[in-house]
Image: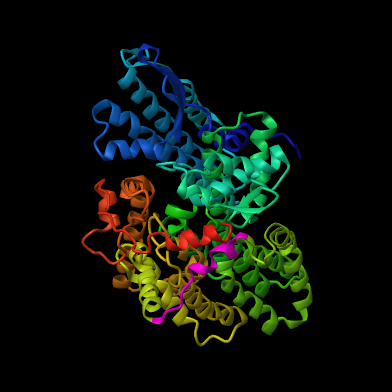
């Protein structure tokens, strides 16, 4: 017996490095700038400043006709190489190294040939010059894979660590955001980790001073006494992601707006990718590996999890992660009960309430599950929930003197007038420019999933059915908002909180279909999935918040009319058009009230 690692195994283990090595270093013609290109995008510095151009942005430039000819192929080819290399990676992890080697060579040759086409055989042309660093390493790596002696007894890493590869793949796709833009709702969340690391304080005085004159930014900071300002929004996310921000801080990376933007997007991508993994693991307890993977991928790329939660550092992303984790813990507890499940459920529940108080009702099914199905564990669950929420409860009381902190300032935005409340409720579900089932039609199938388990007398079934009224009331809460549309976002941002429940129900439906296959139904399911993914691609690549006409009406709120089927955000985004200005008639009255109350 020997502990020596074979060359074949070594090559398989180091395969992921190929995704991160630069495929070339380039210099733009006439010394205008230089940069580094990866398969996922490039970083360049020019006389107009530094910029990061993700692969998705390049694809958008080609689709909208900005780039044509050789330049278009230069932007598109990394996507082809990436797809081929990812397939090679899957084969390598499954211990099929010969096939992996062939695909790796092809992926490398695509990048090399593209650079020859663009720069010439000498890699120097009027367009500039490049050093094809990784483009040459990739095919050489493929050759080594082919020449290595196959390890027939090697571990199938793809099967044994499927969740890890799912996390890596989804995270890298999420990181390719098409149009990185600062969102005013996130400014406090993005700035607080830096304040904690650099100034060792929860105050955001410096950030407020920078943005005080901006109407859309200034009110996001609340005066908390002694001239200090704090974030209007909950601080669960910025506190939990501070360790991630500590990496560039400890490395001495200079603070800048670009660093804030990149870190916020990496954080949101990681949070959301983790929620996808938890959904996958939860579904694995309910069905087979393939159906669970399909359910997780629908959650990842066919819902606003992709177009909203993964793109911006909203609290919705953390809500999705915590709820997905609680779903996994409940399902796992039914398979194998453990005190740790209740401890973790309690911690997640406490964090969930203070992460986004308006989502709090969605934790009631978890509380009901513990009380009704495992009452003897109530104390350990309750103590854990209290400890999980305690730091944020103390923060809110000290800073704001209220239970829910800065969010108490916006409670007056809720109005429970019955006619508009019901209309808004329907709007959140079916309005052409905001409806959940419009932007994610595949979720209609989740309703069948809830129906399928209605007669099952199991703890988890009762738990999931208990989620239905919790979701209905949560939607009513958001329907009561004066801004029930969710601002200048693509789709029903506020309803991303209910997606984990709905995807689990969707998984139940898909499992039922797997056991009782029907050709016509399967065709409809495929169509709904394809349409949902296509809509989310539009949201990720084409939708531009800045294209809406708010800049022309600086003292008013402008947005898409949620019910106007003649002015569709999905169609307009696809064809690069803006919305017609729809101005709310409140003249900012709610904003004035918030400011008067100290917001």
Residue depicted at x 33% and y 70%:
430
Q: Position of residue 352 (x, y in %)?
A: 63, 64
- Please tell me which residue is depicted at 64% across the width and 40% down the height of the picture: 194
Magenta residues, as a range?
A: 406-418
Q: Quadrant of residue 449?
A: bottom left
Instruction: Give the vertical position of 138 relative to 226 (above or below).
Output: above
At a point 41% along the width and 23% down the height, the residue shown is 48
Magenta residues, dominant SS class: helix
Residue 560 seen = yes
Quadrant where the C terminus is found in the figure:
bottom right
Would you place residue 337 above or below residue 191 in this image? Answer: below
Query: Which residue is depicted at the point 45% across and 54% down?
Result: 308
> Residue 240 location, x and y as percent?
66, 51
Residue found at the very far front of the displayed protein? 596
Residue 584 versus residue 262: which sits nearer the camera?
A: 584
Q: Is residue 575 magenta?
A: no
> Which of these two is toward me, 544 or 504?
544
Colour logic: rainbow
Q: Could you tell me residue 35's position as x and y percent?
A: 46, 22
Counting every numbered tag in the picture gives: 0
Quarter of the rendering containing residue 42 = top left
Q: Foreground: 316 or 301? A: 316
Say if residue 154 shows up in the picture.
Answer: no
Q: Give x and y (percent) for residue 526.
A: 33, 63
Front residue of this view, candidates 397 and 37: 397
- Location of the N terminus by quadrant is top right
Instruction: Give the residue at the far left of this rendering.
Output: 566
In magenta stretch: residue 417: yes
């Amino acid at each position: 017996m020997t502990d020596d690692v074979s060359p074949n195994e070594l090559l398989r283990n180091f395969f992921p490095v190929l995704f991160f090595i630069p495929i070339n270093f380039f210099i733009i013609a006439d010394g205008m700038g230089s940069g580094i290109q990866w398969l996922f995008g490039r970083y360049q510095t020019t006389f107009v400043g530094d910029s990061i151009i993700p692969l998705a942005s390049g694809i958008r430039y080609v689709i909208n006709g900005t780039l044509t000819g050789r330049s278009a192929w230069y932007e598109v080819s990394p996507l082809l190489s990436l797809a081929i290399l990812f397939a090679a990676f899957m084969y390598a992890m499954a211990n099929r190294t010969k096939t992996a080697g062939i695909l790796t060579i092809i992926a490398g040759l695509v990048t090399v040939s593209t650079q020859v086409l663009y720069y010439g055989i000498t890699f120097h042309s009027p367009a500039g010059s490049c050093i094809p660093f990784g483009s040459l390493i990739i095919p050489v790596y493929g050759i080594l894979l082919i020449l290595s002696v196959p390890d027939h007894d090697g571990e199938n890493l793809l099967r044994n660590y499927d969740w890890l590869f799912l996390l890596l793949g989804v995270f890298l796709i999420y990181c390719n955001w098409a149009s990185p833009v600062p969102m005013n709702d996130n400014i406090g969340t993005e700035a607080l980790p830096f304040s904690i690391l650099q100034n060792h304080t929860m105050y955001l005085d410096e950030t407020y001073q920078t943005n005080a004159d901006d109407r859309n930014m200034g009110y996001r900071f609340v005066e908390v006494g002694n001239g200090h300002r704090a974030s209007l929004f909950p601080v669960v996310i910025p506190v939990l992601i501070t360790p991630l921000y500590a990496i560039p801080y400890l490395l001495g990376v200079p603070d800048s707006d670009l660093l804030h933007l990149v870190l916020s997007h990496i954080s949101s991508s990681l949070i959301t990718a983790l929620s996808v993994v938890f959904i996958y693991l939860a579904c694995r307890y309910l069905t087979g590996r393939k159906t669970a993977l399909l359910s997780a991928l629908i959650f990842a790329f066919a819902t606003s999890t992709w177009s909203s939660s993964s793109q911006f550092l909203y609290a919705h992303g953390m809500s999705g992660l915590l709820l997905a984790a609680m779903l996994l813990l409940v399902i796992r507890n039914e398979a194998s009960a453990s005190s740790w499940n209740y401890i973790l459920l309690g911690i997640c529940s406490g964090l969930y309430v203070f992460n986004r108080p308006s989502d709090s009702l969605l934790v009631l099914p978890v509380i009901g599950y513990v009380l009704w199905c495992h009452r003897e564990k109530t104390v350990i669950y309750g103590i854990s929930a209290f400890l999980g929420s305690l730091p944020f409860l103390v923060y809110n009381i000290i800073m704001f003197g209220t239970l829910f902190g800065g969010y108490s300032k916006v409670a007056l935005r809720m109005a429970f007038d019955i006619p508009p409340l019901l209309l808004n409720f329907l709007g959140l579900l079916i309005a052409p420019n905001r409806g959940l089932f419009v932007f994610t039609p595949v979720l209609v199938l989740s309703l069948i999933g809830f129906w399928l388990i209605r007669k099952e007398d199991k703890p988890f079934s009762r738990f999931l059915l208990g989620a239905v009224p919790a979701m209905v009331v949560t939607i009513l809460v958001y329907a009561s908002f004066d801004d029930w549309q969710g601002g200048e976002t693509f789709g029903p941002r506020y309803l991303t909180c209910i997606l984990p429940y709905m995807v689990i129900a969707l998984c139940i439906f898909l499992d039922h279909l797997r056991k009782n296959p029907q050709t016509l139904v399967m065709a409809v399911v495929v169509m709904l999935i394809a349409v949902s993914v296509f809509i989310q691609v539009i949201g990720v690549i084409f939708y531009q918040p800045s294209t809406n006409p708010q800049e022309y009406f600086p003292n008013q709120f402008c947005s898409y009319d949620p019910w106007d089927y003649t002015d569709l955000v999905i169609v307009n985004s696809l064809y690069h058009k803006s919305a017609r200005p729809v101005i709310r008639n409140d003249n900012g009255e709610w904003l004035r009230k918030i400011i008067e109350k100290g917001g």
